[in-house]
Image (cartoon, helix red, strand yellow):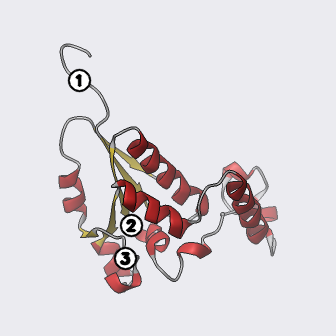
């Protein structure tokens, strides 16, 4: 406590804008960790992040090898045929050994834990998506303003991934 106020984190609002496997799992793990600590969590999927909640694409996400400094390889090497598939296979194998569930199962776990899952209205319109294209666990479609309104209150943190 500082100056008589409680500075504890009360809500995590996570924005996922990319559908790279590493970005999506980072958001999922942060949201899940928050719930395990008794902290409310919400995930807002926008732009290409919507692929993480599209029934047809969610289990086909990849690791980006080009332009990803975390790969520690030259861009030219990352662009070679098969490199992205190899990196994705390696990451999924490591995650399986750690008992990290696939995207579809992780979304079910997040939903069951109380994490709110939202799709961005504007991005859905841009990509001509309908709610029927998305997972059943989705809590709804929000505008950016709606998302910000949900972020009100002391102790709320917003993370953009």
**Circle 3 residue:** 136
Residue 124: % across, % down: 34, 78
**How many C-alpha atoms fall within 10 Å of the one at disc 2: few (<14), some, or many (≥20)?**
many
Q: Which residue is mark 2?
A: 46
Q: Nearer the viewer, mark 2 or mark 1?
A: 1
Q: From the image, tell me which residue sits under label 1.
A: 6
Q: Residues within 10 Å of mark 1 (few under 14, many from 20)?
A: few
Q: At x 26% / y 35%, what residue is drawn?
A: 155
Residue in the image at 73% along x and 53% along y:
71
Q: Secondary structure at mark 3?
A: loop
**Real-space Cα distance between discs 3 and 2?**
17 Å
Residue 94, how many percent across, how many down? Answer: 73, 55
- Work out how far the residue at label 1 is from the one at label 3, CA to CA, in angstroms: 36 Å
Height in image: 58 above or below 111? below
Most foreground residue, 75 or 90: 90
Q: Residues within 10 Å of mark 3 (few under 14, many from 20)?
A: some
Considering the numbered disc 2 on the image, is that residue within a helix, a strand or a loop? loop
In the image, is 63 to the left or to the right of 53? right
Task: Say if residue 130 shows up in the picture.
Answer: no
Instruction: Give the mark nearer the N terminus: 1 vs 3.
Output: 1
């Amino acid at each position: 406590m500082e100056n008589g106020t409680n500075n504890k984190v009360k809500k995590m609002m996570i924005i996922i804008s990319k559908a790279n496997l590493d970005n999506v799992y980072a958001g999922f793990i942060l949201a899940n960790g928050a719930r395990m600590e008794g902290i409310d969590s919400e995930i807002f999927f926008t732009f290409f992040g919507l692929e993480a909640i599209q029934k047809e694409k969610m289990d086909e996400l990849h690791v980006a090898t080009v332009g990803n400094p975390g790969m520690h390889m030259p861009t030219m090497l990352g662009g070679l045929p098969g490199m992205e598939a190899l990196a994705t296979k390696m990451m999924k194998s490591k995650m399986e050994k750690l008992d990290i569930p696939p995207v579809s199962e992780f979304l079910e776990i997040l939903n069951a834990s109380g994490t709110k899952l939202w799709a961005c209205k504007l991005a859905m319109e841009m990509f001509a998506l309908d709610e029927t294209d998305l997972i059943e666990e989705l809590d709804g479609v929000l505008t950016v303003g709606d998302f910000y309104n949900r972020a009100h209150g002391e102790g709320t943190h917003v993370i953009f991934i």
